[in-house]
Image (tube, rainbow, N blue to C red):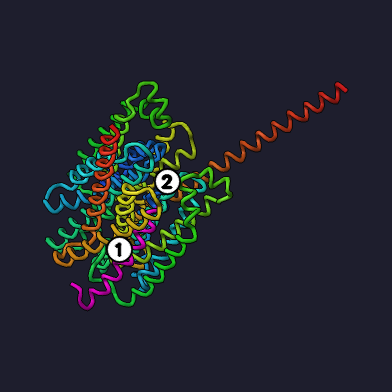
Amino acid sequence: MSQVLRALFAPGFFASGPVRAALVVGAVVALVTGVVGVFTVIRGQAFAGHALGEVGSAGGSAAFLGGANPLWGYMGIAVVAAGLIELLGLHRPRARDVATGLVLGAGLGLAALFLYLDTTSSSTTGVSVTILFGSLFAVSQPMLPSIVALSAVALVVIASCYRMLLLSSLSPDLAAARGVPVRAVAIAYLVVMAVAVSLAAETIGTILATALLIGPPATALRLTKRPGGAMAVAGLVGVAAVWIGIVLAYDSFYWPPVDHGWPVSFFVVALVFAFYLAGGAVAALGRARRDRGRGAALRLETSTCADAHGQAA
Amino acid sequence: MFSGFMVDTWIAASMVAVIAGVVGFFVVLRGSAFVAHAIPHGSFGGAAGAVLIGANPIAGLGIFAVGGALGIGWLSRRGRHDVATALALVLMLGLGALFLSFSVEYAEAIYSLLFGEVLGVPADDLLPMAGLGLACILAIAILYRPLLLTAITPEVAEARGVRAGRIETGFLLVVALAATMTVPVVGVLLMFSLMIGPAATARSFTDSPLQAIGLSVAVALAIVWFAIAVSYLTNLPVGFFVGTLGAVSYGCGRGWAAWRRGRTVALAA
């Protein structure tokens, strides 16, 4: 047993400070993005979710330049971007698409500027790679309380307007007819998404932020249609992907071709993608079985009908 | 600014602007901004892989762009389109992160791949770029009517027997081609804003497709030329100017549309 454990977890796994911080932060972020992401997928706002994470990197690099904490940079600019997207893309889904694109383009332009200034002012070319790709193992431990607190705030907001949010996501017309302030709910949701995504982007990188916001919720929604259940499944899938990814990344220090570890982002993304495909396969299997069951019931029904006809004749 | 090696940059940038303007019109019309962002951005992973094995980055970029386009097409047949796009994007970027971690010493080259480099266009790249650009224009010309039809009136397109799925895959491949040819100048991140900004601006000035395409190309050319000139003078990254100018030009377009609406209302009254 202990040999199996040793083969799975390379020596020093649980004793390492960065690993423990990564496990905690990874789980918190995966839970929040999983819960928030269910609505992102239902509302068809994957693009906005991704864009807010990317735009946040402009704030992150600006904060780095000014010596401030990057988390506040990410969050500030992501919330502003969320407001702009909502303001510009008022009516139709296509206008929203273009508005998101324009905000993303402008944000990336700013990111290019700040990253350039970062690299020229401090001559550390690694900065751009760290900001753009992030690393779970580089989570700064003093930030842990802020991360947990912000996650809690995001979850509380989601929980407190859960019914309004759900109704206006599934059927905006019905929600408006029932007196739900659809527009206000949309703005509130976009801000919560900005907080969740920028939290994720700052701690684990923009790639993982998008992966965790979309992948686990989409997987969950393939498996169950109930939103509450989907949130639970999404959180579980996200945490599983992050934790398995961390274990693999830690183990990969002993793998070829180089004598340093493989990036944890790669493992987590690959796992998220594999879960999504597996979720699709499971859902297809379930559908096929239901269809076969329904077919059998139908056959039974027609044969008894035929029998009855025969007897009547 | 116009001497020697800079001539190649001006030619390359102009080709990029024309392609971005034409393809961008359909991106905006069809609401495919996410795909137009995801394919160039994701194909960056292919460039990182090509750098790792010592191949030409453009080849790696092309392979990832086409693979990504086909992958998005395949995934969105079984699920939501935006979810498929997001997942394909992060998968390609995850592979890019893996390749990057094996070749840390190329951080500088990778930065210019992401955000563009005015002085970085080798003369050898011009011919393949022109070839890819021509292929793009040709494909758009062939697909012109079905692309418009499936975007504006999907019902009519269906009644006429146009297969929307195939047209969409074809369009994704065109975006992939366009993404591949633009790397050396504006970078994978900013190609995208060059597709959205000018086309969205053009749409607020005119409703006619051909006029909008022409205007979109003109705006894209103006933005790229201005961005290169200023970037050359100030040494700031060209992507910054392209990204922000795209948004500024769109703001002008919206302002113009609002002003014209206001005037027609005033005239009618």
- Chain to which the residue tagged by mark 1 belongs: A
Q: Disc 2 designates what residue?
A: B83
Which segment is the magenta one? B1-26
**Where is residue B42 drawn, in percent x and y?**
37, 58
Marks 2 and 1, how far apart in space? Answer: 33 Å
Q: Disc 1 designates what residue?
A: A260
Q: Which of A5 and B125 is in front in this view?
A: B125
Q: Residue at x 43, y 58 (%)?
A: B68
Alpha-carbon neighbours of circle 1 within 10 Å: few (<14), some, or many (≥20)? Answer: some
Alpha-carbon neighbours of circle 2 within 10 Å: few (<14), some, or many (≥20)? Answer: many
Q: Nearer the viewer, residue A281 or B229?
A: B229
- Chain to which the residue tagged by mark 2 belongs: B
Q: Which of B5 and B151 is in front in this view?
A: B151
Q: Which residue is drawn at 11% across and 51% down?
A: A66
Helix, strand or loop at mark 1 = loop
Q: Which residue is drawn at 48% across and 40% down?
A: A222
Q: Is residue A90 left or right of residue A126?
A: right
Q: Is residue B252 magenta?
A: no
Q: Is residue B80 visible?
A: yes
Amino acid carrying label 1: it is His
Q: Is residue B2 magenta?
A: yes
Q: In this view, does A129 lie to the left or right of B60?
A: left
